[in-house]
Amino acid sequence: VMASMAHLQKEKLQLQEELLGLQEKLAARENDELSLSLQLQGQVETLKAKLLEQAQEIGRLRSELGGTDAEKHRDLLAAENERLRQEMKACEGELRELRRQQQQAPCRDCPHLQESAGLREQLSQLQREAEETRAKLVELDLEVQQKTNRLAEVELRLKDSLAERAEEEERLSRRLRDSQETIASLKSQPQQIKYIIKTVEVESAKAKQALCETQSRNQYLQEQVGMQRQVLKEMEQQLQSSQKTEAQLRAQIMMYEAELERAHGQMVEEMQAMEEEKNHAIEEAFSRAQVEMKAVHENLAGEEGAGVSQGCPSSVAASPAPHLCLVPAGVRTNLLTLQPALRTLTHDYNSLKRQVRDFPLLLQETLRSARAEISQAIEEVHSTNRELLRKYRRELQLRKKCHNELVRLKGNIRVFGRVRPITKEDGEGPEASNAVTFDTDDDAVLHLLHKGKQVSFELDKVFPPQASQEEVFQEVQALVTSCIDGYNVCIFAYGQTGAGKTYTMEGTAANPGINQRALQLLFSEVRGKAADWDYTITVSAAEIYNEALRDLLGKEPQEKLEIKLCPDGSGQLYVPGLTEFRVQSVEDINQVFEFGHVKRVTECTNLNEHSSRSHALLIITVRGLDHSTGLRTTGKLNLVDLAGSERVGRSGAEGSRLREAQHINKSLSALGDVIYALRSRQGHVPFRNSKLTYLLQDSLSGDSKTLMMVQVSPAEKNTSETLCSLKFAERVRSVELGPVSRKAELVSWPSQEQLEVTKGLLGDSPGSAATPGRGHASHSPGQLSGRTASIRRKLQTSG
Ligand code: ADP
Ligand code: MG
């Protein structure tokens, strides 16, 4: 028993030791568990913090977007979900830990087993729960996905609406700006208005479509013009060939007539010859008969003398037959042979006589029929000619119509470019090298090499350096002649100083420019229409320098002129005191030009410099009156040599130079503004912002035609100014001046009063010249030469 007791004691001790070990192990494990749970708690804390952050984020988003109930519910579910997920994770961790414990301590009967069974049960339940939660989670995930999508959509929509609002704001601010501008210009304060141009291309689909249509129509018209031209050419050829045949026919007729004459002469000659022959034959026959008669008589006398008298009366010729028997046989046979000869002779004679009598008739007949034939042929030729001419005229008219249509479609503002040649003044070396090139296939395109980059510009037409004055004028002459039909026309030369503005407008004495050629063309056109129309052509020359308008042809060139509204209420503008010369010939023009030139030279020390800082205007007015209908037309052709467009203000100019530059900048940009306003069809066009635009108001608005000749220098050193000029050209080019209409009105014959007023306006009396308030003063060319001479004398005396 003792032994067993000792054994048991030992066993007990052993077990107690074991228990202690296990307890130690348990304590260690509990420690582990504690640290694990602490760790897990730390993780849970961080996750909770994250969750809180997300919840806050969601809350923020929701407050931004305005969450719905469903969204709130979803968020709640998501939080719950998150919590469950955490729980599950914790449980799984616990489970893992327990499993590990179980493996490490495989004790069978210890209370841990029961505990573990309970725990396992709990675990399986938790697993089930986890399964359920996972399913729920998946569901919730899906829902979350959907919600996120919706959220993104809502966000997009929000962005769109924000963009829309920004656009709306932009538009409103633009309108605000526009109206502010309008208000500013309405107040017409003298302060400078800065002009800001924003090219906003607003092209609706309709406009685009219309553009496409117009373009295609344009193309079609151009094709038609080509076709018509061809037809015209063919007709011209036909006309020529018919004229040739007519000439041939005429030559033939002449030939026939000559032949006829010759035949007639021959016939007359022949007739004469025949007559002579006949006379001769008759004479011969007569003499023969006489001889024979004599012989017979002799015979008879001989027989009587021989005493063979039958008592016959002496007259034989009276009744020869009864004596025939008495006539000796020789005579009788003679007589018998003579008789048929006489008969044939008489017959011949008669027939010849008949022929002679009938001949003139026959001749007349033949001549008549020949003439009829000829005149018929001529008539035919004439009628074909007439027909051809009619067709030709119709084609011409059609061509004109097509041309007009083409012009209408192309708009009323033409922008041409002209590149002057490189000159000696450009110097030598790289600075003077050429920077402008052209397109061989397209005469409207020009390329500029600026700072190593090639920039291309498209204008309506580009004249290369080799283009002659003649070629340039050919392109503008249609514009010039349209002022005869009552259109107002402006031709501007724009560009930096030295780019060729004056060369293009005035030209040289040997090679005149647009000014003189235009007047010459007007003279010849007016002469051609003189049968139906009475035309008066007058010219004025003015200069705008530092915003002051001066008359270049008046007595007082220093006097500043004002632009006023016509008192007749027509809304037209006029310049009281601006001299108008009536011109009728090239000599008159030369005198006027010389006169203006003299004026300008006397006024300034350096004409070249002065002219580059002032705008020179030549205003040609064509007034027409149709005798038969009473239709009156007035067209104005304004030829403007603008001041140099170079940007002087930037190069640190001072004093008067700076003031000049400011005035130039102002007036050139005012010109641009006016054209821009016209293009965008704004209600208010700022004509009054500069003297130039105000003066040309009538000729820029409504039914007018404008040509901007942009002059550029090809030299490398000028490229930046060239670039500016070409940019200006491109900006102006897209401008429309509205539909062209003819400025003509049907008026009754002028009353005496009107005539007197007209006389006063255009009269030659020296007293009426340059009288302010009496309208346009005028001088005759005769006076002009006298005045020029006196100016010259003054010049000479003043040295
Ligand atoms: P702007 O009037 O623009 O200041 P100009 O007409 O005085 O310029 O021209 C400057 C110089 O260039 C003048 O000597 C002129 O003769 C010359 N020139 C301009 N264009 C041409 C051209 N197309 N052909 C020949 N010479 C030209
Ligand atoms: Mg010049």
Image (cartoon, rainbow, N blue to C red):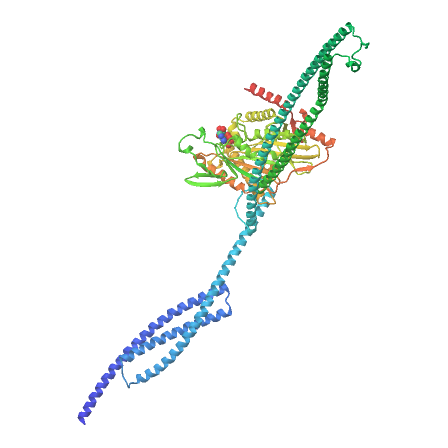
- Residue occupying image coordinates x 23% and y 83%: 18
In the image, 757: left or right of 230? right
Task: Give how far across and how far down residue 24 sits, in percent.
Answer: 26, 80
As rendered, which of 257 and 60 lies closer to the eye? 257
In the image, 679: left or right of 148? right
Q: Do we see residue 549 in this rendering?
A: no
Task: Give how far across and how far down residue 111 sits, in percent.
Answer: 30, 85
Residue extending farthest bottom: 1
As rendered, which of 334 and 754 lies closer to the eye? 334
As rendered, which of 652 and 350 lies closer to the eye? 350
Q: Do we see residue 381 in this rendering?
A: yes
Task: Give how far across and how far down residue 783 sits, in percent.
Answer: 64, 23
In the image, 57: left or right of 107? right
As rendered, which of 649 and 319 lies closer to the eye? 319
The quadrant holding residue 185 is: top right
Residue 666 vertical position relative to residue 97 in the rendered view, above or below: above
The quadrant holding residue 634 is: top right
Task: Give how far across and how far down residue 573 sits, in percent.
Answer: 64, 36
Residue extending farthest left: 3
Q: How many marks?
A: 0
Residue extending farthest top: 305
- Residue occupying image coordinates x 61% and y 27%: 252
Q: What quarter of the picture does the N terminus occupy?
A: bottom left
Residue 280 vertical position relative to residue 430 in the rendered view, above or below: above
Residue 649 vertical position relative to residue 287 in the rendered view, above or below: below
Q: What quarter of the picture does the C terminus occupy?
A: top right
Residue 324 vertical position relative to residue 745 in the rendered view, above or below: above
In the image, 747: left or right of 448? right
